[in-house]
Image (spheres, rainbow, N blue to C red):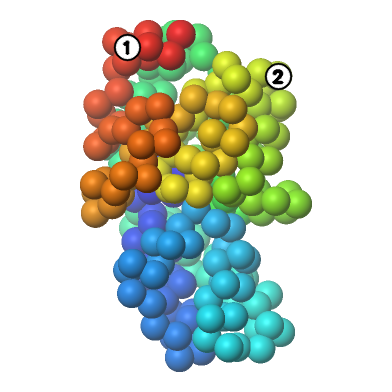
Amino acid sequence: MDGLLIDSEPLWEEAAAEVLQEFNIVLTGEQYHTTRGLRTEEWITYWLHYGKINPAHIPGAVELTIRKAIEKIDARAIPMPGVQEIFALFKEHRYKIGLATSSPMTVVHVVTDKLNIRHYLQAMTSAQHLPFGKPHPEVYLTCAAELNSVPVKCLCFEDSFHGMIAAKAARMKCVVVPDRLLQHEPRWNAADLRLNSLTEFNGELLKNFL
């Protein structure tokens, strides 16, 4: 969802930076990308541990980061190119569509309403309260179960490395649309298809996954 359907990753990064700054932790963009795709609690925990901060601060830092991110996303986030077209394509071909994300469900509701895509979705699953988050496949397997779909017959779209690994671990096909600054990295070769933008996906490419 974040970084694939809506251009919210810079806003998550901004929210995280504001919270981490309170603990005198300043991340480079490269450092931030290493934990992209993880649940909020996991990457806050990781970076507070990195900064040798008392773990007692984790719950408050997580809550504040989510609240700041929601405010920023609701006010400033814009759709990624091709979002409406790709949903329309899969609806036209009568696919069931689900959303599986590491973001909290509170963020999911804000984004799906902002993008006006909730009517396309037959399932929405968040890894927030699952035992495992990405790169574990649980959130994808949970989404497939809610869709009453077999994982090996699912096609997943991802933008993060952790998400791509989660999708492949679920035995799903994966189309990855990495951040433009990371597109050159060879690790994306693990996906079934790499695109520069959702606008590049079309009916002809879909036939390759049937």
Task: State how many labels appear.
Answer: 2
Q: Residues within 10 Å of mark 1 (few under 14, many from 20)?
A: few
Q: Residues within 10 Å of mark 2 (few under 14, many from 20)?
A: few
Q: Residue at x 32, y 68 (%)?
A: 29
What amino acid is found at the position of numbered circle 1 in the picture? Gly
Q: Residue at x 60, y 88 (%)?
A: 53
Query: What is the distance, in whole Å, between disc 2 and disc 1 at their CAs?
Result: 24 Å
Residue with the mark numbered 1: 203
Q: Quadrant of residue 36?
A: bottom left
- Disc 2 is placed on an element classified as loop
Residue with the mark numbered 2: 148
- Disc 1 is placed on an element classified as helix
- The answer to which of 178 and 106 lies nearer the viewer is 178
Q: Which mark is residue 78?
A: none
Q: Where is residue 182? Give x, y as percent.
A: 28, 52
Of the image marks 2 and 1, the number of the one nearer the N terminus: 2
Q: Is there any visible trace of residue 134 in the rendered image?
A: yes
Q: Quadrant of residue 81?
A: top left
